[in-house]
Image (cartoon, grey):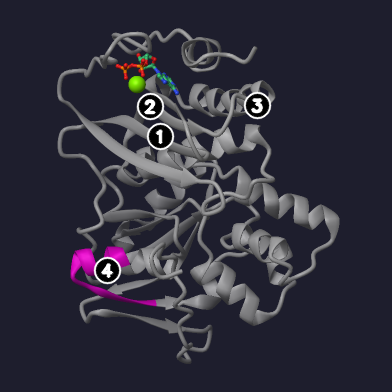
Amino acid sequence: MSLGEFDLIARYFARPTCRAALGPGDDCAVLALRPGMQLAVSCDMLVEGRHFLPTVEPRRLGHKALAVNLSDLAACGARPLACTLAIALPRVDEAWLEGFSAGLYALAEAHGCELVGGDTTAGPLTLCITVFGELPVGAALLRSTARAGDEIWVSHAIGGGLGDARLALEAFRGQVSLPGAVFERVRLAMEQPQPRVALGLALRGLASAAIDVSDGLLGDLSHLLRRSAVGATVDVGRVPRSADLAAQSLALQRLCTLAGGDDYELVFTAPEAASAHVLEAARGAGVAVSRIGRIEAGPGLRLVDGDGRAVEPVWSSFDHFRA
Ligand code: ADP
Ligand code: MG
C-alpha cells in the first residue's frame, strides 16, 4: 500500500530542526529572530513542463527548487534561515521523493536553511518554496538604488559565464547539437544552479543595487534600471561566457548570455571607487565577477560591442503570459 500524506511528510520532509524555535509538526513553524534583524521573505513556484522538464533527476529538482529561492535571498544580501515547501504530487513515488528530498536537504544544509513546514497535496507536479532570511535592519540590497556613474557587475563561476543553462535548453529543444560531455556540463548548469548567497552577503554595504538573473540578463537588468530611474550602457563583449558557449555562433552566444534565463547569477552596481572591494568580496565568496557596463542618468539600456559600436538588443526576456 502506498504511503499516506502524513507518513509521507514524516518520512521525507520532517527532519529535526535546531535553529528554528519550532519546526514541522505543528500548525505553524516558529522562527527566532535576533535583535536588530529583519526577516527577508521570498517565494518561487516551479511547475512541471514550464520550469523544468519531466526528465530531470528528482535530486537535481530538489536542489533547484530551493536554489532559485536562495538566489532571491542572495540578491537582497540576506542570510538564509528557513524555508517551507508546498508540494503537489500526482502520485506517491518513493524513489522520486527520496531523490527530491535528498537534493533539497543537501542544499538546505549547505546554507543553514532549515525546512520548517509546508503543505502536501495530490495534483499536477508543482513545487512552491518560501524562504526566510535575516538581515540587519535597513541593510537589504535593493533594485531601486543604483546611481549614475556606478559600474555594473555580474557574477559567474570561475572560468564560466552566463548562458550555459539556455544553451542546454536549446540543446534539449534540438536547436543546437552539443558533444556529450558539453551537454552534460551545461545541463548541470540548468538543472543544478548554485545560488550566490555568500556573494550577496559580502556585497552588503558595498553594492548600490542588486537583482538576481533568473529571466535573462537584459530583462532583469532593465527591472533594476526602471526601479532606480536610471539607464545604462552594457558592453556585450564583456558579458562572461564559458568556453563551450564561446564555441557557438555569435547570435547564439548573445541570445544565451543576454536573454538566456535560469542563470541565477547576481547583477549588481557599485561606485567605481569600490571596485577593489567588489573583487575582494567575490574572491572571498569563491566566485568571479565581471564588469559589464555603467549606469547613466538617461533612461534606457544601450548595448555596444568592444569598439563602442551599437548592438541590437536581444529582447526575449521570459514572460510567462507572453511566452
Ligand atoms: P495543516 O492541517 O495545518 O495544513 P498539515 O496537516 O498540512 O497541516 O501539515 C502537518 C505538518 O506537516 C505541518 O507542520 C506542516 O508544516 C508540515 N508539512 C506538511 N507538508 C510539508 C512539506 N511538504 N514539507 C515540510 N513540512 C510539511
Ligand atoms: Mg495542510
Give above or below for 185 relative to 91. Answer: below
Q: Evaluate if marks 1 and 4 touch, with contact meaning CB atoms under 8 Å apart.
A: no
Closer to the observer: label 2 or label 1? 1
Task: Please tell me which of labels 3 and 1 falls first in the chain.
Answer: 3
User: For residue 180, what is the image quadrant?
Assistant: bottom right
Is 295 a magenta residue?
no
What number is the disc on residue 99? 3
Q: Evaluate if marks 2 and 1 touch, with contact meaning CB atoms under 8 Å apart.
A: yes
Q: Around disc 4, counting alpha carbons within 10 Å, would you say few (fewer than 14), some (14 to 19), or many (20 or more)? A: many
Residue in the foreground of this view, choosing between 121 and 273: 121
Reading the image, the residue beneath label 4 is: 225
How many callouts does the rendering have? 4
Closer to the observer: label 3 or label 4? 3
- Which stretch is magenta? 223-233
Q: Quadrant of ligand 1?
A: top left
Image location of residue 7, percent across then percent down? 52, 10
Cα separation, mark 3 vs mark 4, equals 40 Å
